[in-house]
Image (cartoon, helix red, strand yellow):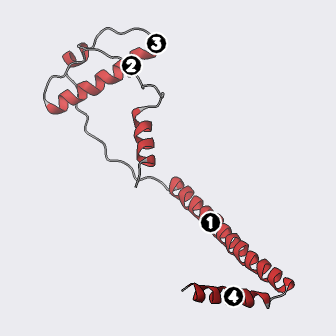
Amino acid sequence: MNMTLMMLAEKVLKGTEKLSGIEITSMTVVGLGVVFGALLILVCFLYLSGGIFKRMGAQKKNAPAAPAAPAKVKTAPAKAIAAAPAASTGDEDEIIAVITAAIAAMSAADGKAYRLHSVKPVSRGGNGRSAWAQAGIHDATRPF
């Protein structure tokens, strides 16, 4: 078995000895030219297709939207809105008002009486990212 490998190695070496340095250099240059030419064609294709998709996205944004049908709005009971706790000043008042309105709308839709007991800020853990950002990172980096 070693003898056949030795004979094969000698044939390979003898086959390359027939090429001159200029021929080897020209084959190398042609090979590199083909590879870089294919890469250039690929880059041009991706650049042009990106431009086409950007134009299609711009056309969708500029298209007139169909008028939406008017939605039926149910009013929340006054006692659900009045059940909100006393809040502090500034932007927190607006946030609590929105949360309370959402709860009142849910209670009106379900026919149940929901009540807001307290509003506390959510701690984001040690990395400072929201739950949605953490879920996105987890989804993008999980193993296959």
Residue at the farthest right position: 22
Categorize mark 4 by other alpha carbons within 10 Å: few (<14), some (14-19), many (20+): few
Q: What secondary structure is marked by label 4?
A: helix
* Amino acid type indicated by mark 2: Pro
Q: Is residue 81 above or below residue 45?
A: above
Q: Give the CA separation, mark 3 to mark 1.
A: 50 Å
Judged from the image, the secondary structure of the residue bearing numbered disc 2 is loop
Instruction: Tell me the crowding category of disc 1: few under 14, some 14 to 19, or many 20 or more residues within 10 angstroms, Cα based.
Output: few
Write down the residue under mark 2. Answer: 121
Q: In terms of image quadrants, where is residue 85?
A: top left
Q: Nearer the viewer, residue 92 or 65?
A: 92
Q: CA distance from mark 2 to mark 4?
A: 77 Å
Sequence-first disc among 2 and 4? 4
Quadrant location of residue 98?
A: top left
| Lateral position of residue 33 relative to residue 126, left or right | right
Frontmost of labels 3 and 4 is 4
In the rendered image, which residue does mark 1 sit on? 46
Q: Which comes sooner in the sequence, label 3 or label 4?
A: 4
The answer to whether marks 2 and 4 mark residues whose Cβ atoms lie closer than 8 Å is no
Most distant residue in the left direction: 111
Earlier in the chain: of badge 2 and badge 3, it is 3
Q: Which residue is mark 4?
A: 10
